[in-house]
């Protein structure tokens, strides 16, 4: 009898768990990035999380203190949950920079679509280049951190071994080493 058998649900659960941890770390990094940026630019914290929550689930803060608290809770829950996407990407065997770029595109792309849809931010075509760059930077901090943490947690997994075997079979190791992936 085998004590440990590979199975799809076990791999999915593992990827989700690692993804949640990566998302939590990435949210912390993004929050720090935003705090530093707000100090430099004198920008007030965004109330987008609480506005979207009010519109989607009907939670209306009773006062300013509740508004800030709910906004932070949603920010952390949303960011942590996006780590699951990084876990799903990891299940494909994709890792390193390619996985981080896919995750970055998904996370920032969703924000660019969702926030204007709920009238909490103008469409990207109507934003100042500086605002777009700052938002992109914060999302890049998120995706890079999630990628580093996920890949560290997933090191040595069956998916990584499968990916490395494919790279060797396709004779891509030299190309990948040149790209530092």
Image (tube, rainbow, N blue to C red):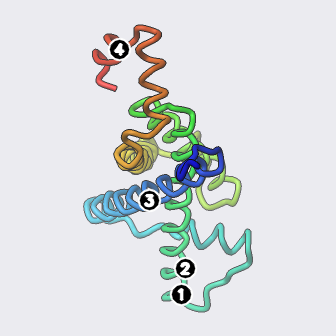
User: Label 4 near label 3: C-beta < 8 Å?
Assistant: no
**Which badge, 2 or 3, is on the more N-terminal residue?**
3
Q: Residue at x 53, y 50 (%)?
A: 4
In this figure, which residue is indicated by the disc labeled 3? 21
Q: Residues within 10 Å of mark 2 (few under 14, many from 20)?
A: many
Q: Which residue is mark 2?
A: 70
Along the polypeptide, which appears first: circle 4 or circle 2? 2
Mark pair 3, 4: CA separation: 29 Å
| Residue 89 image point, x, y percent | 55, 39
In this rendering, position of residue 121 left or right of residue 117? left
In this rendering, is residue 70 above or below 36?
A: below
Q: In terms of depth relative to the viewer, which is nearer, 165 or 33? A: 165
Q: Earlier in the sequence, mark 3 or mark 4?
A: 3
- Identify the image quadrant of the C terminus: top left
Regarding mark 4 in the picture, which secondary structure is present there? helix
Is residue 26 or residue 154 the one in the foreground? 154
Q: Which mark is residue 173?
A: 4
Label 1, on which residue?
Answer: 66
- The mark closer to the camera, 1 or 4, is 4
Q: CA distance from mark 2 to mark 3?
A: 21 Å
Few, some or many residues within 10 Å of mark 4 (<14, 14–19, 20+): some
Which of the two labelled residues, at mark 1 and mark 4, occupies the earlier sequence position?
1
State how far apart marks 4 and 2 are (Cα).
Answer: 47 Å
Pick the residue in front: 63 or 73: 73
Q: Sequence order check: which comes first, mark 1 or mark 3?
A: 3
How far, Cα to Cα, is label 1 from label 2?
Answer: 6 Å
Q: How many marks?
A: 4
Camera-nearest label, 1 or 3: 3
User: In the image, residue 73 lies at what x, y percent?
Assistant: 51, 75
What residue lies at 37% left-to-right and 63% top-to-bottom?
28
């Amino acid at each position: 009898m085998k004590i440990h058998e590979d199975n799809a649900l076990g791999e999915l659960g593992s990827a989700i768990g690692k993804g949640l941890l990566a998302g939590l770390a990435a949210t912390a990094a993004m929050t720090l990035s935003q705090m530093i940026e707000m100090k430099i630019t004198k920008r007030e914290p965004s109330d987008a999380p609480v506005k979207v929550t009010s519109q989607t689930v009907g939670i209306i803060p009773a006062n300013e203190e509740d508004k800030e608290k709910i906004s932070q809770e949603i920010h952390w829950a949303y960011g942590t949950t996006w780590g699951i996407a990084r876990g799903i990407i990891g299940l494909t065997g994709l890792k390193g920079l390619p996985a981080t770029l896919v995750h970055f595109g998904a996370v920032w792309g969703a924000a660019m679509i969702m926030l204007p849809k709920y009238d909490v931010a103008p469409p990207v075509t109507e934003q100042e280049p500086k605002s777009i760059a700052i938002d992109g930077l914060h999302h890049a901090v998120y995706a890079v951190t999630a990628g580093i943490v996920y890949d560290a947690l997933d090191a040595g997994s069956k998916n990584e071994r499968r990916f490395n075997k494919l790279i060797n079979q396709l004779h891509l190791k030299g190309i990948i080493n040149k790209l530092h992936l």
